[in-house]
Amino acid sequence: MANNSLNILRSRYASSLKEFISSPRTFEILDRVPTESHERRPAQNARSLFILDSSFNPPTAAHLEIASTALEESPHSSRLLLLLATQNADKPSKPASFEDRLVMMTLFAQELRTHLQSSLPSIPTADLPQVDIGVTKKPYFVDKAAAIEQSGEYPDDLEQVHLTGYDTLIRIFNPKYYPPTHTLQPLEPFLSRHRLRVTTRPDDEWGNLQEQEEYLRHLAQGGREQEGGKREWAERIQLIPGRKIDDVPVSSTRARNAAQSKDTLLHSLVPAAVSSYIMAQELYQSNDI
Ligand SMILES: Nc1ncnc2c1ncn2[C@@H]1O[C@H](COP(=O)(O)OP(=O)(O)OP(=O)(O)O)[C@@H](O)[C@H]1O
Ligand SMILES: NC(=O)c1ccc[n+]([C@@H]2O[C@H](COP(=O)(O)O)[C@@H](O)[C@H]2O)c1
């Protein structure tokens, strides 16, 4: 997309965001990619709504892999929602601005569809899954899921499949987030209706694949029952082995640092259109990243 169109898109997102933030709404779809199919109804036959919730600060090659591998499994019966969380459970907000992140999400969605065109050559471009660009004020997954259900944007029988990394699975299962009782019981409405597709993080910080699989086995064997965690929830959680890209661990933090130090590593960490936007807009140059 030309710089001028991106600036117009950025201004449009800035005003829709302002309106959303001052509204009582907790979830809203701001755009769809491609925009020409901007109708308010999901693709025919869609049974699963994959949701990638993130700060998209910036969207990375890992996010692309997480979303594309999910869609490649069931391209005819799924669609994707990229969900920008304007409030994070733990982290304070940092640059880039939310409107820049929304532009990067749009570029990411276009790049994802280009990726799907080559990985799914038998599917006509017009039939590739549409990507929704949404925002939520809710930091916790239980509340994000409920806000999406209550929005009426999707049919009731569309099952939500939340795409997360292993680090996020650990945090979803941390009772500290669920006052006042600090048990896992508040997860019941979420895990009795929806699913988690969790990509392991191939990063020393999170242990090896076996250790990450053991975490789920522990839940399946009733190891979290004293905290209110049901063993049957494990059946609703699928673990997918993640991989390093060009042999480096990928994270938004690494991408922000690479952008700040003008390191060419940025090109391996984020999709090409996203790195061009980061450079053109000179994002992540302040010390506050
Ligand atoms: N390399 C990765 N492998 C597996 N999951 C990932 C990876 N990068 C991000 N995710 C997952 O994608 C979701 C959104 O990611 P998030 O925006 O927190 O990215 P991040 O790279 O962890 O961000 P930051 O570095 O700013 O903390 C989270 O559920 C996170 O676990
Ligand atoms: N218990 C929970 O549902 C829970 C805990 C921690 C983070 N989160 C959310 O996970 C998403 C990813 O978080 P990070 O950007 O901190 O990796 C954010 O939307 C964050 O608010 C949810």
Image (cartoon, rainbow, N blue to C red):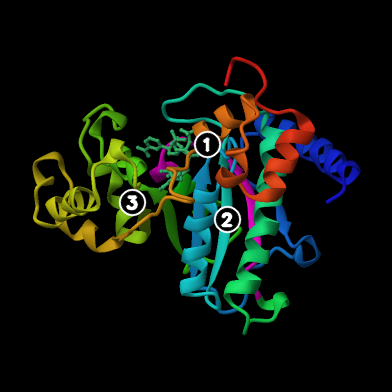
Q: Quadrant of residue 236?
A: bottom left
| Relative to 58, residue 133 above or below | below
Check the image and name the residue furthest to the right: 4
The span from disc 3 to disc 1 (Cα, nearest Å) is 16 Å
Residue closest to the eye, 271 or 130: 271
CB within 8 Å, label 3 to label 1: no
To which quarter of the image does residue 56 belong? top right
Quarter of the figure with the C terminus: top right
Relative depth, front residue between 163 and 161: 163
Where residue 32 appears, as percent x and y from the top left, is: 71, 57
User: Under 8 Å from ligand 1: the CB of mark 1?
Assistant: yes
Which x, y percent locates residue 28?
64, 46
Q: Tell whether 55 sits left or right of 190.
A: right
Mark earlier in primary sequence (3, 1): 3
**Disc 2 C-beta below 8 A from ligand 2:** no
**Which residue corresponds to mark 2?**
81
What's the amino acid at mark 1? Answer: Ser
Q: Position of residue 12 (x, y in %)?
A: 82, 40
Mark 1 Cα shell of 10 Å, populated few (<14), some (14-19), many (≥20) = many
Q: Which residue is tagged 3?
A: 200
Task: Say if 272 sits above or below 111 in the image.
Answer: above
Q: Secondary structure at mark 2?
A: strand
| Residue 176 in which image quadrant | top left
Using a 10 Å C-alpha cutoff, classify the residue at mark 3 as few (fewer than 14 neighbours), some (14 to 19) or many (20 or more): many
The residue carrying mark 3 has its beta carbon less than 8 Å from ligand 1: yes
Kind of residue indicated by mark 2: Leu
Q: Which residues are magenta?
A: 128-143
Residue most toward the top?
287
